[in-house]
Image: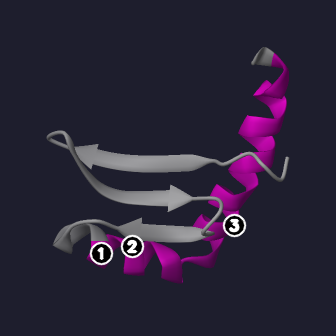
């Protein structure tokens, strides 16, 4: 499970605005709007905890499929 990465990206009009990366452990913004949203999302500890749990919940369950 250590070498598995969970990524949750938010895109609009083919442009990636914000991304949660399990290796980084927080949201990263790629546009002005994305940076503002990343700061807001990173302050919400329950949102961060939920995203971190997705790596084990989603990725570990699907390891055998690949």
Q: Residue 49 carries which label?
A: 3
Is 39 situated left or right of 24 in this image? left
Element type where label 3 sits in the image:
helix
**Residue 23 horizontal side relative to residue 37, left or right:** right
* Picture residue at 78% right of the left edge, 42% below the top: 57
Q: Is the magenta stretch mostly helix, strand or loop?
A: helix
Q: Which of marks 3 and 1 is nearer the N terminus?
A: 1
Decide: is 30 above or below 62: below
Name the residue tied to disc 2: 38
Q: Residues within 10 Å of mark 1 (few under 14, many from 20)?
A: some
Q: Name the residue under label 1.
A: 35
Foreground tag (3 vs 1): 1
Q: Magenta segment range?
A: 35-64
C-alpha span from label 2 to label 1: 5 Å
Residue 65 in percent (x, y) is at 77, 16
Q: Are circles 2 and 3 on residues that touch, CB within 8 Å?
A: no
* Res. 14 image quadrant: top left
In what element is the residue under mark 2? helix
The answer to whether mark 2 and mark 1 are in CB contact below 8 A is yes
């Amino acid at each position: 499970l250590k070498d598995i990465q969970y990524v949750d990206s938010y895109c609009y009009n083919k442009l990636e605005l914000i991304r949660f990366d399990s290796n980084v452990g927080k949201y990263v913004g790629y546009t002005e709007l994305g940076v503002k949203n990343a700061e807001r999302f990173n302050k919400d500890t329950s949102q961060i905890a939920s995203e971190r749990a997705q790596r084990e919940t989603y990725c570990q369950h699907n390891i055998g499929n690949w």
